[in-house]
Image (cartoon, rainbow, N blue to C red):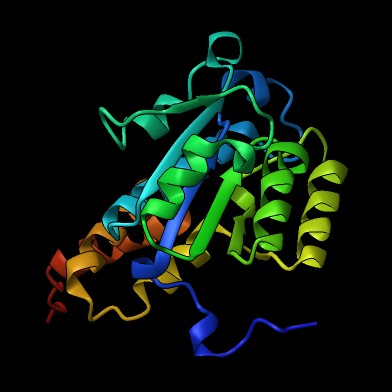
Amino acid sequence: MTFRNGLASLLRPEDSVLVLIDHQPYQLANLNSHEPQMVINNTAALAKTAKAFGVPTILTSVIAERGGLLFPQITDVFPGQEVIDRTLINTWQDPKVVDVVKATGRKQLIIAGLWTEVCVAIPVIQALGEGWDVTVVTDASGGVSVEAHEVAIKRMIAAGANVMTWMAVAGEWQRDWARLDTAAKLTEVLVQHGGGSGIAYLWEQQLLKTPVSKAAG
């Protein structure tokens, strides 16, 4: 086994390309591994983080005419961008998707989608076999059951995939809070989608602006 470790193994925004697969109403209707609203939140956060760091993001759906359009929380992040609609279940067998990914010249392939056991696992396993460095964002993905999601994650890890959550991806891309050009943008994503972390930041800002009361006497 080749272990993924060392500084060079961490995600870098300049080497990353994100593919969001089939975040559609049909798949969401039978999402049972996660609370559906959480997956919508996390996927939107991942999309906004990718945009903040200038990471190319490919949007793809499967038979959108029947399965529904991608969540607007995602497409609104990339207004006017084409969503590649497929008939193939395996995104990595669709030449249009693969050609767009390859055209970026990047090798760190980051994938999230619905469902984990089908539309995520299949392209991930194929891309790994072709030599890609693949990361799966587990909390922006989900399956028809907890078991389906977890078994798929184990299967992809066994095939060589790296697994992370959206906030972990954001942390590796930022790496240093002195990178002010992206720090403010990432902070805004955390405020919108980071739950307690975002609220704590707003509270901190409130306290910094609150005058300290003078003791009586």
The answer to which of 10 and 85 lies nearer the viewer is: 85
Q: Is residue 79 left or right of residue 160?
A: left
How far from the left and from the top, in percent, is residue 215? 16, 79
Which quarter shows the C terminus? bottom left
Q: Is residue 78 left or right of residue 91?
A: left
Q: In the figure, 217 relative to 69: above or below?
A: below
Q: Is residue 91 left or right of residue 73?
A: right
Residue 198 appears in which quarter of the rendering? bottom left
Q: Residue at x 60, y 62 (%)?
A: 134
Q: Is residue 203 visible?
A: yes
How far from the left and from the top, in percent, is residue 122? 73, 45
Q: In the figure, 16 relative to 146: above or below?
A: below
The answer to which of 92 and 185 lies nearer the viewer is: 92
The answer to which of 136 and 200 lies nearer the viewer is: 136
How far from the left and from the top, in percent, is residue 53? 29, 60
Residue ranking furthest to the top: 66
Residue 157 appears in which quarter of the rendering? bottom right
How far from the left and from the top, in percent, is residue 214? 12, 77
Q: Is residue 194 visible?
A: no
The answer to which of 127 and 200 lies nearer the viewer is: 127
Q: Residue at x 64, y 56 (%)?
A: 127
Q: Residue at x 41, y 34 (%)?
A: 74
